[in-house]
Amino acid sequence: MRSQIFLETLETRVMPAVFGTPWPDAAHLTVSFVADNVALNPGWTDASGTAHQGAQSQLFAALGGSVSLSAWQGEILRALQTWAAQANIDITVVADDGEPLGTAGAIQGDPRFGDIRIAGEALSTDALAITTPFSTLAGTRSGDIVFNTNYKFGIGAGPWYDLYTATLHEAGHALGIGDGTDPSSILFENYLGVRDSLGAPDIAAIQSLYGARKPDAFEGEDGNDSLETATSLTHAALSQFRSSLRTLGEEATLPTRSPLQVVGDLTTMNDVDTYSYHATNRDTAFQVRLQTSDLGLLSGRLTVLDDEGNIVGQATASEPGQDLVLNVAPTSSGRFFFRVDSPRTDGFGIGHYRLVVEANDPGATATRLALRETLLEQTPDNDSLANAVRLDPLVAGNSAVGAYAVQGRLSDANDVDFYRLQGSSHSSSLTVFLSGTGELGLSVLDKDGNVLAHRVAQGSLSLRLDDLPAHGKLYLVVTGTSATPYRLSALRNAPAEATALTTSGTLSATAPVAYRGLLLASSTLVRLDLLFTSAQPGAASVEVALFDAQGTMVYREIVPVGQKVTIQLFLPAGAYTFRFVGGMADGTTLNDIAYEASAVLLSDPIGPQLINPDAPPPPPPPDPGWYDQGFFTYLALLDPFGRPIAIYYPPTVVTLP
């Protein structure tokens, strides 16, 4: 009898994270590679005063042993671009300054690192990699992908896991798509071998969130693939500038010189965009630039042709996101064509670009500048309810979630910017994100100008409103204490955040110690929120210590009573015990301290392929949850101030389900 092959189920159907929330501004996503020795988990100090480092990234060391830097980074970027090419998504590579993962900051657009950060850590064997989808609870960990450095990754088939295939799975999570049960999908929860493309379910899922990739506005009915159907570069540039005025209002800015420029898109691998240009001064040379580095991962090609279609210059990118420059000599006619396409046959042949023509022609530049200044003068500011700039929804798919985004600037501490959202046809939720520098204020107003919500924070903030009435117009108001550029984005009908697992209790003079067990069914990123309160807090504090199933302390923090603490930790699957110990700074009798602890699971792993031909499939692991008392005991007790306390007899050990 032929042996039957079983795939081990590595996680329950209770999703560790909530998926289905798109990035608010998917057309401007960034990715960065985290250097080795950057902290992935926070450090801590044990009761003896010894400092412990948290887990640190070792991605470069793990992947660089047998694969070149450009090769393994190229495979990761290729996987991300495979998703982006199917929808209205563009991703650019930015530098990573080495801040610890989870550093407080803007969820999207933080200048210190990418929205999606790529790292590596020695995780437990139940996961090849772990990814955190976009979430207000995850903060800057949203989108981060952490590879398990205990496994070997390579390129293509071999005695390793294919890096492109593993990243393709994780990139889907980073963009908001959860695991599936269809083996034809790259989001199937286990690794099933090398894959070279997305499955039909994957394309449907990404387009449901972000929409099928939309051609640029210059294609027209017949496209602009040929010289006969070429788009006038001058008309296209002015049309696009007028459109930006409608969106940005007074925030539109002009350089001292004003080259013609237009942002277009190669929407398919066969797309060709052609522009016509007539130089005002036929005796003057000019420069043509194809810029992609700040817009996406397109690997483009730029061709300049004369008025008879003869090639007078051509440049081809040798890597994704590379900018191209051509210097063009004058001709007697002064007429040219610019052709933008790509020789690539993969996702790098798709994406946005900026075509810029910089002519040494002061007269033509002055004429265009004067026209633009006239347009600016006709555009009112947005400093009042009446002049609020309307935010139109970004291109979206069939998802009920609507996304809005704008980049603005406060000119000084007295500037106030108003934006308007049209009412929804049904009751809805609204999640708003604001990031900039200095202290920022964000208000949500109803159609009559009444404040529905208001928040002030340093650097970045978010707020959510639920059950908003149907057909109600809303206003978003941005304020600050200094001049600053900012990014404002909003999501309508974003799914509610992950449900927290909660537990509570009381520490007292007779029972100053409490234990709580936390069972994790798979490796995950855990957000822990801890709050200790007392009617008479005095100088009370609580020691929070976390132990794994072997009794090893893996985290410790002293929390003053009255403060709420949030901790984010990558934790392997298994049983953990929290120990809470209360104490008074002056050694007096402990007042009752109420505690509340909640845990939210924010990430989802891909499991390795585990085959057992001789045994039936193992039962699924128990659901994540809190368990009273804990899974083990630890008797060497000190209070938060280092003083021994009376022996506290351990509770009955909880039996694992």
Image (cartoon, grey):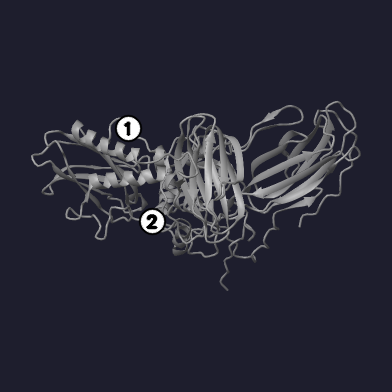
Q: Nearer the viewer, residue 619 or 422?
A: 422
Tell me, yes or no, if residue 228 can be seen here: yes
What is the quadrant of residue 551 in the picture?
top right
The three-letter amino acid code for the residue at tag 1 is Pro
Tell me, yes or no, if residue 156 can be seen here: no
Residue 152, image x and y in percent? 51, 46
Q: Quadrant of the C terminus?
A: bottom right
How far apart marks 1 and 2 lie (CA) works out to: 31 Å
What is the quadrant of residue 584 in the picture?
top right
Of all residues, the one furthest to the left in this rendering is: 332
Mark in front: 1 vs 2 = 1
**Residue at point 48%, 29% (across, down):** 412
Mark 1, other Cα within 10 Å: few <14 / some 14–19 / many ≥20: few
- Secondary-structure class at tag 2: loop
The three-letter amino acid code for the residue at tag 2 is Arg
Mark 2, other Cα within 10 Å: few <14 / some 14–19 / many ≥20: many
Residue 173, image x and y in percent? 52, 52
In the picture, the disc for residue 456 is none
Q: Nearer the viewer, residue 35 or 240?
A: 240
- Secondary-structure class at tag 1: loop
Q: Earlier in the sequence, mark 1 or mark 2?
A: 2
Q: Which residue is mark 1?
A: 255
**Residue at point 43%, 37% (across, down):** 94
Q: Quadrant of the N terminus?
A: bottom right
Residue 68, image x and y in percent? 41, 40
What is the quadrant of residue 296 in the picture?
top left
**Left or right of residue 33, residue 369 in this image:** left
Of all residues, the one furthest to the bottom in this rendering is: 1
Residue 261, image x and y in percent? 28, 41
Q: Which residue is mark 2?
A: 213
